[in-house]
Amino acid sequence: MTALERGSCALLCWFPLTACASRYDAGIQVELLSRQSGELAQSTALGVVKIDQLSWTSSEIELTRCPSALARARDWLLPAAHAHGASTPTRLAVPSVVNAGADVALGELTPPAGRYCSVRCRIAPADDDALGLGTAPEMLGASLRSSGELEPAGSASSSWSLQSRRSFELSRELELELSADQLHARLSFGLDAQRFREAISVGWFEPVAREELLIEAFRAAFVVRVE
Amino acid sequence: MFWALACAVCSTGDPTLVVAGAEQPFAGRLRSALELQYQTHVAGRAGVDQLRISETRADVSLAWAPDPRWLLAARLPLLDREIEDASLGVRETWGAGELELDARWFVWTDRELAPRWLLAWLGGVQLPTAPLHRDAAGAVLPLEAQPGAGSWDIVLGPSLSAFAGDTSLYASLRWTQPVLTPGPFEPGASLGASLALQEQLASWLAARAVSELRADRPSREQGQRDPDSGGAVAFLGGDLLWSPWVDLVAQLGARVPAFSRLRGAQREGPAFRFALVRDW
């Protein structure tokens, strides 16, 4: 074997080692899901209000870091608007229709390590590609919808429905510290049944201002829990 | 006398120990090298999008001189990259990098035997032999995780070697210009410069002081300019070369970043090298 042949062989022998591969060991993961418990029906002066459906379209969910003193000063001097529409490690921008009667997995965030003090949720009308629209087609174009029956004492029940196409945001405080010692967390989104029941009133069945009442009830009852 | 009779490298008339890529050619010279390097690099903003990259690479190369004016070389890097992202997730990728084929033309030497001055011109091409790494969902991983940019690059540059007794000097410039970028990445053009001053301490031992400069244009990913790419960084360092036996040179060295004007949020760490170079 000549020197050139020996050298070529030495080089070519490396090729079996050149097969490529990759692996990923996940780090911090924050699971997002909707979870509802408690009876939403309420007795009012008009009778028992039964809620058959309560759905909303979760458009964005964003974790917000606990601000440092410097960041607070900067935000005060230079207030910044939220950017919408794209998912980031701290923001899930996948529109999903949430049904208050069922647990729904909304997605997952992989935020940087640190302390998080609040979560911002955007409720907005569902577009064609919103997840979960297949089982709730009436939510197309709606941000919030509720329907049910009103059962007045001694008379036949009648069905009702409320719907909103408005976009609005909610912010809830939370205590969440993510680090190498705390890689996993779960945030659940739902409605406080008692607060929601308390918000149901005769005004729901008046011809005007019903959309606003539904949004206000939703705002009052919306809760986020760290599990 | 024994050295002069036994060693292939003495055909150059100069027994100076030299690293891979700085050799003097003589007809039929065949040289292979295995160079190992470990280096760290940090890109992105802490707590936001920072990537901490540890790279171990093995460059396997073969150089052959058909005559005293030409040195043809092939170099294949094998890379192992470990990347910790801001969420503390760790991705490891490994595989072949981009094969480089080049030719060094020795344009001018001051004399035929044992030249003291050699001026050469390098021309070559880097081929997109590195596979494109994807995650489990099929999405292309960022450039930092890739063993290559997937581009066809042209490599050009002059080099100068000077030998004066036990002291030698090697200086080179190397311009890398991507010419075809069919993949999702568009690496920026890059200029590398190196200057090494070497002192032969004994027939089997040499010490080198090295400075290296790298200046890159920003790269683009998926059509977007990467804000944490490009800029210039200079390293200072040294190597020890020793020859445990005839025709084999071992190299052990380190580089530390001495000057950095990298764009965006980037930080280079020190680099450690070990190489074995064999004349056949």
Image (spheres, coloured by chain):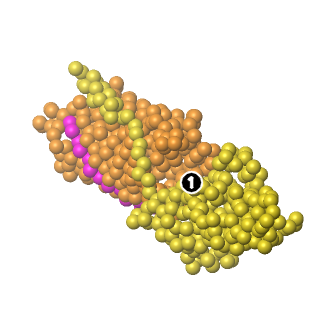
Chain colours: A yellow, B orange
Q: Kindly identify the residue that appears in the image at 48 percent across and 34 percent down.
A: B128
Q: Kindly identify the residue that appears in the image at 64 percent across and 59 percent down.
A: A100
Q: Kindly identify the residue that appears in the image at 42 percent across and 65 percent down.
A: A182
The quadrant in which residue A69 appears is bottom right
Vertical relation: A127 (above or below) A66: above
Q: What's the amino acid at mark 1?
A: Ala
Q: Is residue B57 magenta?
A: no
Count how many numbered circles sit on residues in the image.
1
Provide the major secondary structure of the magenta segment. Answer: strand
Q: Nearer the viewer, residue A203 or B177?
A: A203
Residue A73 visible in this rendered orientation of the protein: yes
The quadrant in which residue A199 appears is bottom right
Q: Nearer the viewer, residue B264 or B96?
A: B96
Q: In the image, residue B181 lies at what x, y percent?
A: 57, 36
The residue at the far left in this view is B2
Vertical relation: B90 (above or below) B10: below
Q: Which residue is mark 1?
A: A105
B114 displayed left or right of B236 = left
